[in-house]
Every structure is written in structure tokens, then in C-alpha cells.
Amino acid sequence: MVIATALYRGSHLVAGGSVVTQHQRDRPFPWLALVAAIAATALIWFMAARHRRLVSWAVGLDVLVIGCLLPFGAYAWGGARTQESIAWVMLLGGSASAMAAVAFGARLLAVAVVLLVATHLAGYLLVEADASVTGAHLNALVFSAVVSWVLTWYLCRQGEQVDAANRRALDAEAQRARFAERVTHHNALHDTVLATLTAIARGGVDANTPRMRERCAREAAYLRRLVEEADDREHASEVRAALEESVRAAEALGLRVTARYHALPAVPGEIALTMARAATEALNNVRCHAGTGHAFLTAAGDSGRLVVTVVDRGRGFAVESAGRRGASGPAGAEASGGSAGAEASGGSVVRAASVPPATGGIGLDRCVYARMRGVGGRALVDSAPGEGVRVELRWPG
């Protein structure tokens, strides 16, 4: 409607310019009136472009000055004494009423139309215009407002219906996602917790064996994570589901993982998958090299970032003074005499400048640093002998 009313006013300005150029070019006031109409129109569309809508005060100024005062000025100072000489000024009132219908509410629009009708009726009476000409003009003025108001109402109503349809579609998609997640959890519970409890209830296994106790501990931890799900689960279900799959994969290989999730931000699916794969590699390093069967994974939002941390209390590794291999590690990382971490090019930070193969350094290079760099994130590794390893994954870096 903003564009439509702009074109409507533009057609009136073209008509007015043609009349002034051909029949009133010797009088100064018609030119001043045309310049004033162009300036008022430019103000309206400048404000509309800035606010993405017609601004009420600018349209109201146009109604008062161009629609109501300009006809009297044309009569008093422009020498408009006939219906033909004043018609182009009156014509601008039609586009003024159309813009008022878009910018104003119903009551203010009614006031604007009444003012325009009264002004234009008085103007045509002053020049003694024919009743048919006066009636046709007033009819056009009123119906310009009516048609613009109806079209504005219709388009707004259609927009609301489209928005409502989009909301319903999003709600349905969210419901389907929740149902799919619920089915996944049910299947997992059936294959793990329920299967274990059933075996114990039937007496088919000895519940006091170390292996069965370890299995029960893993499945209890899984149940605890389900119970402790944060309220933001709906908004970050992809992140949580991807990380939970990494945790369960590590637990299936015998690693006990204590996982906590808090205020997870919504991130693209590709980011969630990459973070989960990097976390999987960090858990694999704990399982294979840390000398401990227990790891801790936390995932949380931090000022719009997603931060995933994997910590173990295993043997750790020593800081070495040799530089990491440039092709496979974060180039340029340095550590001198056991100093704290240095930041590597490509967005990775590591405390130890060189990680021996026995600690999983190659895996960290290829599966953690490279993955995080590839999505604009970064990885930080902190370790010392006997103090375990802390791997922190951040996105964005």
C-alpha cells in the first residue's frame, strides 16, 4: 500500500506539472504550490523508507497543507477562478485521503476525510464549479480513502493469516520433533534400562558382579540426565541429542560419563554435529589414554556461545618445549618451560605445545582442532602430569 499510494500521488504530481507548464507558467504561485506538493511527498516517502511504514504526522501534515490549505492559496494568490484552473490542486486531495487511509486509524481517518471534503466543497463553490464536477470530485476523494482502507485491511488480514499458518507449521514441526525425541528415548530405555531390569528380575544374571554394577551405573546416569533436562530443551534439542549420542557411544565402550547440560543455545544442525564429533574424540582420548574410566562432560551457553567441556582426572601429559607439527596441529602454538597456553592460528588454543602420540595428540589434531576450525570455532586443551586433561570446545570461536 505504501508503493500504491506513492504511485497514486506521483500521477497527480505529473498531472499538476503538466497543467502548470502549459497554462499557468507565468504565475509564481502555481510553481510554489507544485514545489510544496513535491516537498511534502518527498518528506512522506523519506519517512516511510526510514520507518518502513507511512508515518502519521507526515501524512497529517500533507492532509492539512496540501489537501486543505493549498486550494485556498490557489484561489487567493494563484488566480484560480475557474474549475479548470483549480482542478489540479484539488486532485492532490485524492492521494492525500488515500495516504491517510493507510497511515491513520478509523477515527482519525474519518476526521481527515471530513476536513478534505469540507475544504474541497468550499473551493469548488468559490470558483462556481458545476455541481456534477463537484460531486464527481468529492466522490473520488471519499472513495480513494475507502478503497485504500479496505485494501490495507485486507492485506493486513492476509498477513496475519500467513503468520498464523507459519506459527502452526512451526508448532507442528516442534511437536513432531518432540515426538521423535520421545520415541528415541523410549527405544533407548527399552534397549538398556528395561532390558537390564528384566534380566535381573528373571534371575538370569547376577546383579552383584562388577560388570553388572558398572552397567547399572551407566544406565542410572542416563536416566538421571533425562530427569535433569533443562527447560531450554526445545530450543536446543539438536545440540543435546547430538551430545547425548556421543555420551552413550562412549558409555557403550565402557567409559562412565557424567554429563550436565544448562541453557543450551540454539545452533545450526551442522554445528551441533561437529561439536558432538569433537566431543566424541575427546571422550575417546579419555577412554584410551587417560588411565581412568570416568569422564565429565558439560555443555552450556555462554553469552550466545556454545561451550562444551570434557574433563578427566587421569594421568595427563607433560608440557614440551618442541613446537607442534604445522600441518596437523594448530600452527604457531608455543610453550616454553611449561608456561600456560598459547593461542594457535586457525582458532585453536593449547597449553601443551606438543602432545605425544600416546596421549592422543594426532586424534586431537585431526578430529578436534581441524573440525572446530572448519566451522569457525576453536578448541582449548589444558593438561599437566597427574592433573588430567581438560578439552574445551567453543562456537563461535
Image (tube, rainbow, N blue to C red):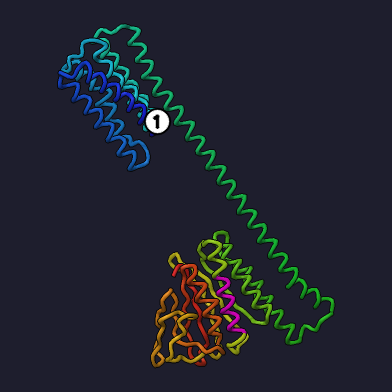
Dominant secondary-structure state across the stretch colored magenta: helix
State which quadrant residue 165 falls in.
Answer: top right
* Nearest the eye: 11 or 74: 11
Residue 375 is a magenta residue: no
Q: Name the residue under label 1.
A: 4
- Above or below 390: residue 77: above
| Image quarter (top left, top right, bottom left or bottom right) of the C terminus | bottom left
- Above or below 21: residue 323: below
Q: What stretch is highlighted in magenta?
A: 275-287
Circle 1 Cα neighbour tier, 10 Å, few/some/many (<14 / 14–19 / ≥20):
few
| Image quarter (top left, top right, bottom left or bottom right) of the N terminus | top left
Point 43% across, 90% down: residue:
322
State which quadrant residue 304 falls in.
Answer: bottom left
How far from the left and from the top, in percent, is residue 76? 17, 16
- Above or below 127: residue 48: below
Residue 111 appears anywhere in the view: no
State which quadrant residue 140 falls in.
Answer: top left
How far from the left and from the top, in percent, is residue 282? 56, 79
Residue 285 is a magenta residue: yes
Q: Could you tell whether 174 is left or right of 329 in the image?
A: right
How far from the left and from the top, in percent, is residue 372? 50, 72
Q: Could you tell whether 128 is left or right of 210 in the image?
A: left
Name the kind of residue labelled 1 in the image. Ala
How far from the left and from the top, in percent, is residue 172? 62, 50
Point 36% across, 11% down: residue:
135
Point 29% across, 14% down: residue:
121
- Above or below 84: residue 333: below
Q: Could you tell whether 390 is left or right of 253 in the image?
A: left
